[in-house]
Image (cartoon, rainbow, N blue to C red):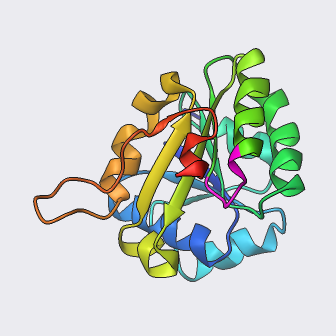
Amino acid sequence: MEPQGDLALIGLAVMGQNLILNMNDHGFKVVAYNRTVSKVDDFLANEAKGTQVIGSHSIPDMIAKLKRPRRVMMLVKAGSAVDDFIAQIVPHLEKGDIIIDGGNSLYTDSSRRAAELEAKGILFIGTGVSGGEEGARHGPSIMPGGSPEAWPHVKAIFQSVSAKVDDGSPCCDWVGEGGSGHCV
């Protein structure tokens, strides 16, 4: 079967669920994954029922459901959990694929991750996502930074789902390289 997913999102706590539903509302097909896979089934049976959200029960399955370049976003606890997921994801990716850390990571960790992943040909975006649960569902402020080559591949998604100012401009733009997204 041809991959359908525009982006995968790992982490089905309230922020992750709301961001997935926001992306779905804007016409993007999101592949949902959680380390506790029963959360995927619960989400699909309840909050995501009747949507285009695609469930996944493993990292290889999640990656197989993504269009290229594959975009994998994590909304997991900052720190070692981010590094652990990156280590699990990277073996399934190809040069030019993109890992996005949407959690509250320290900007120096994002700078390190960007450099390590770029050395392997994988693009990295560390992005601040502000606005809490309501923002995630109806329009957060999004501050992406990291590998500049990744921005064109996520710009439409991020700017579509972000909050808008009165003139309709998105509350999202590229802020720079390294850990700048999490610094801002």
Please identify the quarter of the rendering in which residue 13 is found: bottom right
Above or below, 119 relative to 46: above
Residue 16 location (% of width, % of height):
60, 67
- Seen at 67% across and 16% down, the residue is 95
Residue 81 locus on image (x, y percent): 86, 56
Residue 163 drawn in magenta: no
Q: Quadrant of the N terminus?
A: top right
Q: Is 105 displayed left or right of 123 in the figure?
A: right
Please state the horizontal and vertical placement of residue 161, each as a whole percent of the image.
36, 58
Q: Position of residue 67 (x, y in %)?
A: 53, 32
Would residue 45 be found to the left or right of residue 33 on screen?
left
Q: Is residue 4 visible in this depiction of the protein? A: no
Tell me the magenta residue range. 102-107
Considering every residue shown, the one lying at the far left of the view is 167
Q: How many marks?
A: 0
Residue 104 falls inside the magenta stretch? yes
